């Protein structure tokens, strides 16, 4: 049995699943700063319809890369700004 239960409406920020990179227990997005993208840790909530709820870590003004995987190569070590 699979069930989805929503308990009332809450305002939230949402990002496409592709914009969020999972690093073990951490969730990371790439935020645009000047002419570069910087890895930034976020606190994520539920996933619904290929969207991830952002609970903490981003402001309304932040611009985020649409697909985090394109900014990482297989040998990269990601240093996260908090």
Image (cartoon, rainbow, N blue to C red):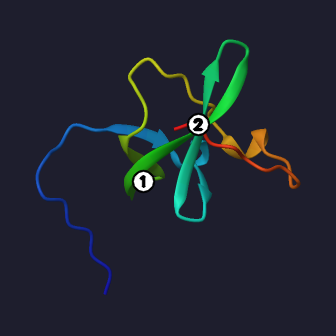
What residue is at 26 percent from the left and 69 percent from the top?
A: 4
The crowd level at tag 1 (other Cα within 10 Å; few <14, some 14-19, many 20+) is few
In the picture shown, does residue 50 fall above or below 3?
above
Disc 1 element: loop
* Quadrant for the N terminus in the image: bottom left
List the residue tagged with mark 2: 81
Q: Position of residue 33 (x, y in %)?
A: 63, 18
Disc 2 element: loop
In the picture shown, does residue 35 fall above or below 56?
above
- Asked if residue 37 lies left or right of residue 8, the reply is right
What residue is at 58 percent from the left and 36 percent from the top?
A: 81
- Asked if residue 47 lies left or right of residue 21, the reply is left
In-front residue for pair 73/67: 73
Q: Position of residue 49 (x, y in %)?
A: 42, 53
- Asked if residue 12 lies left or right of residue 78, the reply is left
In the image, farthest residue toward the left: 8
- Tag nearer the camera, 2 or 1: 2
Q: CA distance from mark 2 to mark 1?
A: 28 Å
What residue is at 54 percent from the left and 22 percent from the top?
A: 63
Q: Position of residue 55 (x, y in %)?
A: 33, 44
The crowd level at tag 2 (other Cα within 10 Å; few <14, some 14-19, many 20+) is few
List the residue tagged with mark 1: 49
């Amino acid at each position: 049995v699979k069930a989805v239960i929503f308990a009332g409406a809450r305002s939230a920020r949402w990002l496409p699943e592709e914009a969020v990179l999972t690093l073990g227990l951490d969730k990371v997005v790439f935020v645009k700063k000047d002419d570069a993208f910087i890895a930034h840790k976020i606190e994520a909530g539920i996933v619904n319809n290929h969207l991830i709820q952002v609970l903490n870590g981003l402001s309304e003004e932040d611009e985020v890369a649409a697909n985090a995987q394109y900014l990482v190569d297989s040998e990269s070590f990601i240093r996260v700004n908090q």
